[in-house]
Image (cartoon, grey):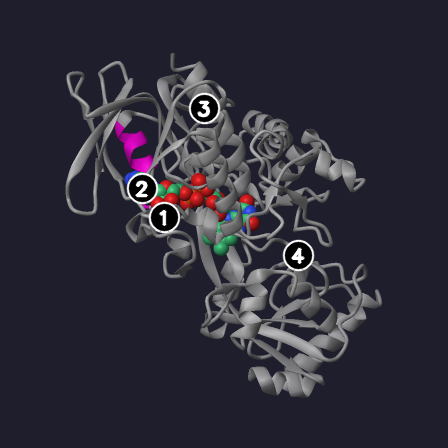
Amino acid sequence: MSVVFDAGRRFDLHVPVLIIGAGACGLVAALAARDAGAEALVVERDATPAGSTALSSGFIPAAHTRFQRASGIADSPAQFAADIQRKNHGEADARLVEAVCQASGPAIEWLADRHGVEFVLVEGFLYPGHSALRMHAVPEKTGAALMAALQRACAAAGVDLLASGRVTTVYADTARRVRGVELERPDGSSEAVGCDALVLACSGFGGNPDMVRQHIPEIASALYFGHVGNQGDAVRWGAALGAAVKDLTAYQGHGSVATPHGILITWALLMEGGIQVNADGARFSNEHAGYSEQCLPVLEQPGGVAWSVYDERLHRLGLEFEDYRQAHSLGAIKRGATIEAFAAACGLSAAGLRATFADVERCAAAEARDPFGRDFTTKPRLAPPYYGVKVTGALFHTQGGLLVDERACVLDSRGLRFPNLFAGGGAACGLSGAHVWGYLSGNGLLSAVTLGRLAGQSAVVLAR
Ligand SMILES: Cc1cc2nc3c(=O)[nH]c(=O)nc-3n(C[C@H](O)[C@H](O)[C@H](O)COP(=O)(O)OP(=O)(O)OC[C@H]3O[C@@H](n4cnc5c(N)ncnc54)[C@H](O)[C@@H]3O)c2cc1C
């Protein structure tokens, strides 16, 4: 990965807007550029575009949408921004957070109304830290279906996609204007594409163990559950061009990946009454603090594993999710008619689990306070038969990246814009501050979709 300052470089072809990466950010940026009247070419290293977007649950938070209003949900960009800032303890750039929240609702409605991406509001449970139901998903509620819908929209809008092309080099002139890129084909051949504007939509560095070790050692030995293609290219090119990078220590972790199956188990089970215990049957954290930061306490338990424990009511809720159904069909979900039978099915200490259930009962009856700070009084108590799944903690994606402004323009350390360089999604610095606990559910696709749209628009309007 390199940057070459060469004002005289000749290119095989030239496009107005060039986008690196065909995940949610890149495809949305391309749609926005097309709507603004420009030709857009998306270059993707994989033969079939997927990215972390296809691996995700595909839940995109957005405020004050017609989907929310149809369900009687009151919400506003300001309320959404306050939730994001509360979660990250005010560490993120307030102006960027406000701009993204403001643009979030219009982005979802634009994708639905102009580009035929069908959305539903995800109802039935709130993710940690959200004060309103605001997750929007395609009806299948999977990231793969979201990717398929975005690809259909791109094809209909006339976006050009060049797959199996890994961009290796960015060419710029000495006035910091990007002139084009070189990409490598699987057979070793290369092509050079010139552009008027470049959008970096090639996500973060979760798939690059050296960069993770360097910037986020606390999660370096954990399972990486995101897309392997996310090698930190945007950060490396940006830094070589003189762009500012921020919050490289930030990431989205997760405390609920079924092991050894490697399947995401929805956090809704824990938000609606489930608990997490270790092999001794003991709880070790407040499960409602957030699923991102929960990766660390789970990894600290013996063997680096924990069990999510719930009941029939929550098992039914789980069955609404494709990945949970998959885990169930693979035998990851254990069941027991009593605490003892369930503990035996999972290999847990029955005495420990019985004591934990008794403690939780007292908290639910408001006779005791949970030492970890969770409120057990608002959800139904767990009842037999019991269900559960063995889980581990994982790194999902990195949240730090290139510093951008409210129009997704890449900035240098003095806050000055690069004339024709834009970034969004995992390539840009996120909205989560500098720590794992700063990630509010949905910050990933929020940045991919909303900053992606802003980047596509700005690439046409500002780079002229
Ligand atoms: C299991 C899981 C569940 C998640 N669930 C959610 C959720 O429900 N809601 C949410 O908000 N977030 C979720 N996330 C996070 C979310 O998936 C990401 O934040 C989001 O997909 C990032 O989008 P992106 O377009 O920036 O990157 P990606 O979707 O990863 O796309 C980047 C693309 O760039 C390509 N690329 C990289 N380098 C190059 C190069 N040099 N040349 C060409 N192409 C390149 C990659 O191959 C990739 O296709 C989840 C993540 C995981 C792993």
Element type at mark 2: loop
Percent of width and height locating residue 265:
57, 63
Q: Nearer the viewer, mark 4 or mark 3?
A: 3
Label 3 crowd bin: few (<14), some (14–19), many (20+), radius 10 Å = many
Q: Quadrant of the N terminus?
A: top left
Reading the image, the residue beneath label 4 is: 288
Q: Earlier in the sequence, mark 4 or mark 3?
A: 3
Element type at mark 3: helix
Q: Quick check: 65 above or below 408?
A: below
Q: Earlier in the sequence, mark 2 or mark 1?
A: 1
The answer to whether mark 2 and mark 1 are in CB contact below 8 A is yes
Reading the image, the residue beneath label 1 is: 48
Reading the image, the residue beneath label 3 is: 33
Q: As rendered, which of 2 and 184 lies closer to the eye?
A: 184
> How many marks overall?
4
Query: Magenta-highlighted stretch: main secondary structure?
Result: helix
